[in-house]
Amino acid sequence: MNALVFDIETVPDVAGARRLHGFAGLDDAAVAEAMFLERRQTTGNEFVRHHLQRVVAIAVVMRRGNALKCAALGSPTSSEAELIAEFFDVIDKTTPTLVSWNGSGFDLPVLHYRALLHGVRAPRYWDTGESDAGMRYNHYLGRFHWRHTDLMDVLAGYQARAAAPLDEIATLLGLPGKLGMDGGQVWGAFRQGQLDAIRDYCETDVLNTYLIWLRFERMRGRLDDAGHAAECERLRAMLQADARAPCAAFLAAWSSAAAAAAAPASPSVPPPRAAASPSAADAAAAGASAPGRSRRGHRAAPEDRAAMGRSASVGTQASLLPFDDA
């Protein structure tokens, strides 16, 4: 097994907006508000366009050989260029299967633009068979290839209107879901210097995604029940051995969510009423029409990661390379 599950957190690129729109003299908060206002007027929401999202955190779960590791790359003081360079360096050296939730729609396009901005090299990631013929029919850029598995896209049958939020799918599966904050709070947390909290949040997102991916691998026959259980136990052992706060919080929430999911559900329907007499039933049938079924269409928007924010992670710099295969 060689997989890299990843997630990013971003904030508005206020420096880029100043360059594009001439917001000289405005502080960061005012520039960001101008960006949000323009998007509200244009689209009705505050989702900042991909090329104006600044990456402030990248978290990964790496499963390779017999090893498993979860980390937020770099440190709270790492530059955007350093975070992105480390991410693509892991890909260049290990060629993992990338796994994401809405990575095709958000994370990777943002990383493309920001890598271009900072001059980050990523030859393995961009190889579609020119250097390695083995990448020709299974490369990172192919939407229907498995080299990058966007779980949200795959499970939705590649239909945007069928997409579901990570938090809801995780909760339905008895997983912790989001802890501490959500994407809409990241910009505010970043403004307050809460980089550790943002990095913790990014790690919990990637842990949820990893557990959903394990369930998906079982569903498509790449893990049997015993293998799936073993991988979950491996993750529990890793979280127990990691003394950092986000790991302890996720492990506790996972245990609580699993217990709640296993508990018997309370009856949700009223007990049956006594049957009506034949004459009353006949009269009711004659005077009533069959109840109609309303179909409430819903558009599950890909997780609102945008209300702008993603940020940096916690603790000291975490290096994934060299990665111990033992």
Image (tube, helix red, strand yellow):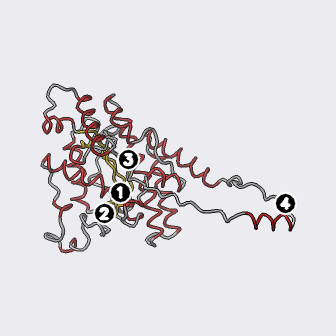
Residue at 42% over, 64% down: 155
For the residue labelled by badge 2, is the local secondary structure a helix, a strand or a loop?
strand
**Residue hosting label 3:** 304
**Residue hosting label 2:** 148
**Residue hosting label 4:** 274
Quadrant of the image occupied by residue 281: bottom right
* Left or right, 150 with reference to 322: right
Quick one: label 2, few (<14), some, or many (20+) residues within 10 Å?
many
Q: Amino acid at mark 4?
A: Ala
**Mark 2 or mark 1: which comes first in sequence?**
1
Inter-mark Cα distance, 1 to 3: 15 Å
Quadrant of the image occupied by residue 142: bottom left
Inter-mark Cα distance, 4 to 1: 52 Å
Q: Amino acid at mark 1?
A: Ser
Residue 222 spot, x, y in % from top left: 43, 71
**Mark 4 or mark 3: which comes first in sequence?**
4
Q: Which mark is residue 38?
A: none
Residue at 31% over, 60% down: 98
Quick one: label 3, few (<14), some, or many (20+) residues within 10 Å?
some
**Mark 2 or mark 4: which comes first in sequence?**
2
Evaluate if marks 2 and 1 touch, with contact meaning CB atoms under 8 Å apart: yes
Inter-mark Cα distance, 2 to 4: 57 Å
Quadrant location, the C terminus: bottom left
